[in-house]
Amino acid sequence: MTDPIIWNAAGLSGWRKSSYSGSEGGSCLEVLDHHPAGIPVRDSKTQKGPALVFSSTGWSSFITAVKAGRFHS
């Protein structure tokens, strides 16, 4: 992987909101599938801001941990 950050993610299309984000707004993540560098993730409120890019393996591990309840709010 090259740079783990896309500094202006607004030019990328195909973002989808995380299934764990509610419909009432607030703190929402958006992810972009099928990007050549990995899995970009951004804050939906800051669409012109940066996106962090995770490896497919790292992102899968994170999703597995979330589904298993390993993170506490």
Image (spheres, grey):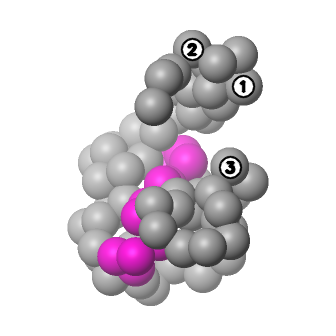
Q: Is residue 61 visible?
A: no
Query: Residue at 40% of width from left, 76% of height from top?
Result: 45
Residue 70 vs 44, above or below: the answer is: above
Magenta span contains residue 72 = no
Q: Please give the range of residues in magenta.
A: 37-47
Residue beneath the point at 58% across and 33% down: 59
Do the residues bearing badges 3 and 1 touch, measured as CB atoms within 8 Å? Answer: no
The residue wearing badge 1 is 67
Q: CA distance from mark 3 to mark 1?
A: 10 Å
Q: Position of residue 17 (x, y in %)?
A: 65, 65
Quarter of the image for the N terminus: give it: top left
Residue hosting label 3? 20
Mark 2 sits on what residue?
70
Q: Secondary structure at mark 3?
A: loop
Calculate the distance from the C-alpha at mark 3 to the C-alpha at mark 2.
Answer: 15 Å
Up-down relation of residue 33 to residue 14 (above or below): above
The reply to whether the magenta stretch includes residue 44 is yes
